[in-house]
Amino acid sequence: MAHGLPPDRLKAEFSRSVPVKKGDVLVTSSIGGLYPVGIRVGTVEKVLPLGPNDVNRSVIVKPAVDVGVIEDVTILEGV
C-alpha cells in the first residue's frame, strides 16, 4: 500500500517480514486482481526504522513519474 507524501514522494508500507531495502524498485502486483501487473511505481529511497510496536515496515519512495506534471489519471475498477 502506498500513499502520497508531500511534496513529491510516496510512503509505502509492507509487512515486517518483507526484506525491502534502499534501491529496490517497486512495481504493481496482482494481489486482489485489481491492478495490471508489473507497472513501475518507484524506487525505495529510505527504509524507516521499525518501532517496537510497528506491525508494518514503512519506506519512502521516489515515484517513477514526476507527479507534479500529471494532469490525467485513470481509475481502474474491478469487475
Image: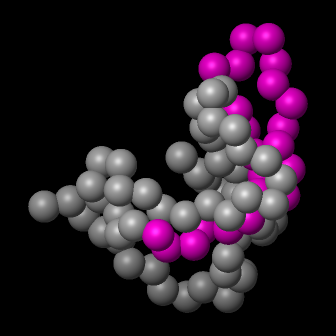
Tell me: 32 left or right of 52.
left
Picture coordinates of residue 44 (x, y %)? 77, 57
Q: Which quadrant holds residue 57?
A: top right
Q: Residue at x 73, y 11 (%)?
A: 53
Can see residue 22? yes
Q: Which residues are magenta?
A: 38-61
Residue 30 x/y as whole percent: 35, 56
Image: 10 above or below 55: below
Q: Residue visible at 70% across and 50% down? A: 11
In the rendered structure, does residue 25 fall within the stretch colored magenta? no
Name the quadrant of the C terminus: bottom left
**Depth order, front residue of 29/5:** 29
Q: Residue at x 39, y 67 (%)?
A: 37
Q: Which residue occupies the foreground of this view, 52 or 17? A: 17
Q: Is residue 65 left or right of residue 47?
A: left
* Scheme by which the image is coloured: one colour
Where residue 61 sits in the image (x, y, percent)? 74, 59
Where residue 17 appears, as percent x and y from the top left, is 63, 28
Q: Is residue 61 visible?
A: no
Which residue is most to the front? 19
- Dividing the picture into quadrants, the one containing residue 29 is bottom left
